[in-house]
Amino acid sequence: MPVYSMTGYASAQHGASATGAETDARTDTRALQSRRLGLEIRSVNSRFLDLSFRLPDELRAMEPALRTLLTARLKRGKVEVRAALENEDSNTLQDPPARLLQRLNSLQDSVKAWLPSAAPLTVADALRLCANAHSGTDDWSEAVPALAEEALTALVAAREREGKRLATMLLDRVKQLRTLAQQAVPMVPLLVEQQRLRFMERWKEAMALTDGATLPEAARDRALTEATAFAIRIDVAEEITRLDSHLDEIERLLKKGGEVGKRLDFLIQELHREANTLGSKSAALDLTRVSVDMKVLIEQMREQVQNIE
């Protein structure tokens, strides 16, 4: 399975023709009103699947169906769905039906009877009310799910492309971390040998101070203890082994794909812990540099893993 990012965007549009419900009994049926439905889906990273909808009133009833559609194909991310309805030619005003205008005039007379001071309807008011009267007559029950499916498929494809890019970047960082770990492995025996030589020099200095006499047993035991403790303290073999194991698991998950974001996030935390321990055991500038370089790479990985589903 591919690796999916939680970041993506897709949109789709659908044109439809809707007839008005109001007709004039003395005229033919009025002209069709051409309308366009636009739908877009945006998603960003989130710990869980968080859906939000911004739909016109006509499409509010479609929200449960849209929610079911999204939850079936998306597992994590903050997802926002927007839909809008508009005339295909916003500069063209449709002639309002005479029957509807008569109804508005009758309603205005009724209002004026109770509220004599009420302002009369303007032409703009009449056009707006007529437009609203027939705006809810379109049936989008089939168009909306089909359009949402189209946009969702495009969104999933976009998240897949972004996920592929993230996986490539993470694998590159894994390769660099392995190189740094290989650089750290031979440093420890070298440091132990250098410390052993320093202990030998101190031993010889102590022997010279005793004029060739045998050094007390306690002093000899202390020198050996210090050498052993130093070797144990700077030994990072265990950290390197665990780090390699975590890198192997990250590679396996990236090749497996699917919902791997949370597991990758946990492994990144473990990598950071091993790099910190490596730095705390550092007894030389070169080993400290390796630890710092590891932390930089791991932090880069952490930022990108936050976007993986």
Image (cartoon, rainbow, N blue to C red):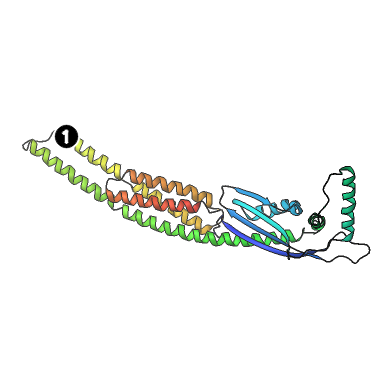
- Horizontally, residue 30 falls left or right of residue 5, namely right
Residue 244 x/y as whole percent:
40, 52
Residue 167 x/y as whole percent:
49, 59
Residue at 62% x, 54% y: name it. Answer: 74
Residue at 70% x, 57% y: name it. Answer: 84
Residue 221 x/y as whole percent:
19, 35
Residue at 52% x, 61% y: name it. Answer: 164
Q: Which residue sits furthest right?
A: 26
Residue 297 x/y as whole percent:
40, 53
Kindly identify which residue carries mark 1: 219
The residue closer to the viewer here, 139 or 289, is 139
- Horizontally, residue 204 falls left or right of residue 299, namely left
Could you say whether the residue bearing mark 1 is in a helix, strand or loop?
Answer: helix
Residue at 83% x, 63% y: name it. Answer: 95
Q: Which residue sits furthest front?
A: 117
The N terminus sits in image quarter: bottom right
Q: How many marks?
A: 1
**In the picture shown, does residue 127 fall above or below 203?**
below
Report crowding for label 1: few under 14, some 14 to 19, many 20 or more residues within 10 A (C-alpha). few
- Horizontally, residue 118 falls left or right of residue 300, namely right
Whether residue 245 is visible to the viewer of this picture, yes or no, is no
**In the picture shown, does residue 134 fall above or below 113?**
below
Whether residue 205 is visible to the viewer of this picture, yes or no, is yes
